[in-house]
Image (cartoon, rainbow, N blue to C red):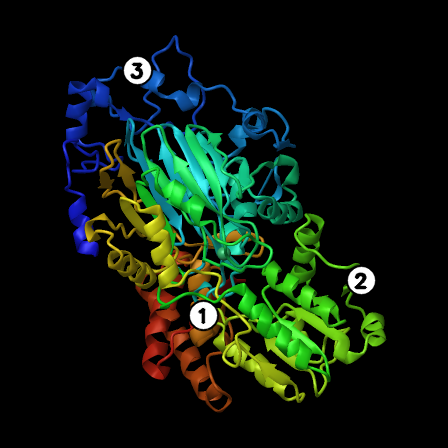
């Protein structure tokens, strides 16, 4: 599939693509320059990065690196082209209000103008103190500029989510000078992140284009779609967020915690009705899709260049969901009839055959378990965002005269928001606050405790119960624990450990391997086929998933008649441009996308020294050598002190320490003999390198070596 796609680069179809032959880092090509001077109607459309406004009486420097001065344009033309720099400060909120009337503008006027100089320029990942609060991370400046986009062309770039599964989803669409962004999720810590908290999409290349960003479209409120907004929004100068009521409600909670609410602007969209919202030059329509959190949307995006895109977000097809409406085939079909240029489809469920089970079937199973459980409590471990599952349990509790207790902070908070926004229906008193007093006042067989911790997370509510450390719940023999969840890949060991700890109490465990107590929120192959048929696109791009998942989705598409030559498999950072005549051009230029991790207070790269050092210490420990030397003669005074951690076992300590100290003295003295005036940093380097080789040879380990020289 990939080889064939590379051939697409050479596809010309009557118009010379700007990506046909690359001659420089900006992507400006010889062909393009000829075209610029010969066909003024077909001149490339430039996108102007944020720059200060020039005095137009003086010749302006070429402040748009995408425009080559040799292309025949005068400098003044360049300035004229640079609409981003000339535009007055743009008030998104005002525009948003015109479009929809529901915008809530809490942002101070002209804040960009006052503060724009504070952005950029810092090359560290440490939080900077600025107008948005103290915990705002900064991306380092990059030298990358988006390649020229021809007039009338529409561009799509996946920024995150195409090289990973269910993680840090983000993408952008560009038309002319305008950019819209879609979703902004996190990836939770992976083993290779070594102690970091989570990873976020790399938006460093976008920091130059904050004025061009017209809005952030959010498909739904899962953390792999919204979790990085609190980090990324302030970096991109707080673009307006567009989303459905529940999606925005949950985002607001996270922005409130980050202290960003005073600067955020929102436009609420009702995805259940056809309604076009104009955002910059884009016409955007949200449409409802089923998934595992209510109020999810897919996106229809149309540009004046004739590109019509459908982006599914995360989706499944459910005829009997709870809280949401059944899949709206009529609407999907109507959108499909408009002639879709590009369909971007969720690939998360693409390796599973058939249809995913309906939420109703899970509800029926849970009801059967509740009705048959006459002894002990029911503990149900579920994802805290699966609000329809909680609603089903509320329905069941009311029917069987039982009470719901919510356990775990995110569960309590998400349900409170959903209830406040009117998503849940229940009789007063059905949910009781989880306190010792309340649990003692309700008989055990009347209690349904819905808890977080289905992934065996160390400090989650269910883990604390299993450790006997939960202050309101003590697990007892006769209780039943249902895992109404799936195991997220990578969590198998921790979930297994949790189940084993729970079984020791004499509880009954039910998982989805025993009974249908959980279903997927993502379309399986048969559902993917239905969407592909209804939207009937010219081009298909599988999104969300690594190459394996996306390739499977591509195979499914081909089985329903999508031409192989029209399937686009893109990695994060790949660029595709769609011409007004519908042909596609894949750029050979790729946006450099790095892996950034949030680590406590700051941010860094997974390739950074910090993570590498952690890896080294984890694998072979640390060795610290302390030399005390005479200031003048540089001779070692007394013994060399040696401390090791995680390097040697008890029975080998004496021997290994002795040979290392002997070697450490030898290297130090020999080096000084050879180079008497050696600088300390060079001496330290030699000590590290020689000892590394020595220790590797003697004990076959590669610890981190830290020599310290103290002069007295
Ligand atoms: Zn999702």
Task: State left or right for residue 619 relative to residue 244.
Answer: left
The residue identified by callout 1 is 489
Whether pointer 2 and pointer 1 mark residues with C-beta atoms closer than 8 Å, the reply is no
Vertical arrangement, residue 546 with respect to residue 203, above or below: below
Whether pointer 1 and pointer 3 mark residues with C-beta atoms closer than 8 Å, the reply is no
One can see residue 664 in this view: yes
One can see residue 186 in this view: no
The residue identified by callout 2 is 429
Q: Nearer the viewer, mark 3 or mark 2?
A: 2
Give me the C-alpha separation between circle 1 and circle 3: 54 Å
684 vs 85, nearest the viewer = 85
Which quadrant is home to the C terminus? bottom right
Task: State left or right for residue 701 relative to residue 540.
Answer: right
- Disc 2 crowd, CA 10 A, few/some/many (<14, 14-19, 20+): few
Q: Which of the two discs, 3 and 2, labels the residue nearer the N terminus?
A: 3
User: What number is the disc on residue 77?
Assistant: 3
Give me the C-alpha separation between circle 3 and circle 2: 69 Å
The answer to whether the beta carbon of the residue marked 3 is less than 8 Å from any atom of ligand 1 is: no
- Disc 1 crowd, CA 10 A, few/some/many (<14, 14-19, 20+): few
Residue 316, position as x, y percentages in the image:
45, 58
Which quadrant is home to the N terminus? bottom left
Question: Which quadrant of the view contains residue 128?
Answer: top right
């Amino acid at each position: 599939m990939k080889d064939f796609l590379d051939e697409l680069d050479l596809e010309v179809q009557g118009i010379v693509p700007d990506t046909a032959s690359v001659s420089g880092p900006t992507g400006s090509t010889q062909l393009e320059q000829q075209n610029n001077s010969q066909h003024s109607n077909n001149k490339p459309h430039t996108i102007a990065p944020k720059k200060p406004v020039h005095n137009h009486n003086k010749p302006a420097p070429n402040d748009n690196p995408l425009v080559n001065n040799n292309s025949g344009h005068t400098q003044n033309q360049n300035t004229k082209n640079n609409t981003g720099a000339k535009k007055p400060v743009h008030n998104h909120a005002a525009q948003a209000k015109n479009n929809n009337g529901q915008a809530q503008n809490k942002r101070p006027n002209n804040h960009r103008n006052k503060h724009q100089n504070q952005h950029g320029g810092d090359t560290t990942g440490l939080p900077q103190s600025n107008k948005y609060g103290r915990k705002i991370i900064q991306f380092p400046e990059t030298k990358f500029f988006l390649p020229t986009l021809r007039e009338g062309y529409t561009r799509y770039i996946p920024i995150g989510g195409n090289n990973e599964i269910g993680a840090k989803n983000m993408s952008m669409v560009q038309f002319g000078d305008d950019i819209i962004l879609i979703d902004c999720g996190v990836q939770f810590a992976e083993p290779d992140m070594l102690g970091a908290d989570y990873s976020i999409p790399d938006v460093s290349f976008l920091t130059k284009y904050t004025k061009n960003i017209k809005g952030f479209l959010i498909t739904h409120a899962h953390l792999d779609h919204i979790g990085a907004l609190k980090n990324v929004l302030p970096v991109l100068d707080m673009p307006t967020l567009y989303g459905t009521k529940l999606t925005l409600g949950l985002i607001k909670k996270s922005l409130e915690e980050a202290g960003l609410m005073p600067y955020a602007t929102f436009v609420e969209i009702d995805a259940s009705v056809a309604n076009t919202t104009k955002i910059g030059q884009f016409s955007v329509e949200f449409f409802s899709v089923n998934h595992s959190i209510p109020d999810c949307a897919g996106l229809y995006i149309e540009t004046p260049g004739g590109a019509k895109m459908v982006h599914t977000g995360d989706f499944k097809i459910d005829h009997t969901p709870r809280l949401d409406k059944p899949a709206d085939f009529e609407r999907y079909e109507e959108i499909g009839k408009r002639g879709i240029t590009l369909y971007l489809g969720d690939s998360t469920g693409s390796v599973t055959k058939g249809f995913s089970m309906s939420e109703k079937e899970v509800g029926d199973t849970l009801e059967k378990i509740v009705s048959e459980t006459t002894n002990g409590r029911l503990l149900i471990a579920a994802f805290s965002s699966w609000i329809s599952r909680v609603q089903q349990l509320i329905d069941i509790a009311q029917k069987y005269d039982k009470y719901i207790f919510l356990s775990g902070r995110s569960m309590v908070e998400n349900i409170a928001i959903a209830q406040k926004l009117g998503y849940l229906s229940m009789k007063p008193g059905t949910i009781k606050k989880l306190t010792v007093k309340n649990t003692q006042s309700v008989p055990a067989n009347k209690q349904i405790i819905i808890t977080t911790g289905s992934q065996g997370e160390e400090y989650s509510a269910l883990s604390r119960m299993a450790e006997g450390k939960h202050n309101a719940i003590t697990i007892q023999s006769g209780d039943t624990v249902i895992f109404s969840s799936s195991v997220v890949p990578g969590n198998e060991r921790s979930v297994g450990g949790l189940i084993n700890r729970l079984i020791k109490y004499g509880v009954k465990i039910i998982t989805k391997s025993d009974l249908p107590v959980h279903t997927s929120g993502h379309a399986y192959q048969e559902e993917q086929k239905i969407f592909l048929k209804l939207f009937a696109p010219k081009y298909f791009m599988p999104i969300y998933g690594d190459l394996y998942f996306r390739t499977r989705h591509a195979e499914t598409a081909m089985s329903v008649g999508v031409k192989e030559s029209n399937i686009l498999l893109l990695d994060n950072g790949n660029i595709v441009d769609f011409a007004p005549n519908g042909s596609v051009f894949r750029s050979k230029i790729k946006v450099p996308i790095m892996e950034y991790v949030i680590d406590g207070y700051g941010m860094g790269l997974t390739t950074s020294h910090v993570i590498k050092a952690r890896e080294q210490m984890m694998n072979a420990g640390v060795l610290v050598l302390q030399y005390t030397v005479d200031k003048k003669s540089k001779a070692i005074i007394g013994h060399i002190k040696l401390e090791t951690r995680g390097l040697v076992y008890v029975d080998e300590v004496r021997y290994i320490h002795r040979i290392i100290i002997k070697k450490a003295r030898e290297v130090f003295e020999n080096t000084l003999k050879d180079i008497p005036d050696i600088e300390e940093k060079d001496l330290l380097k030699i000590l590290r390198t020689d000892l590394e080789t020595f220790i590797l040879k003697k004990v076959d380990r590669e610890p981190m070596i830290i020599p310290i020289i103290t002069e007295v």
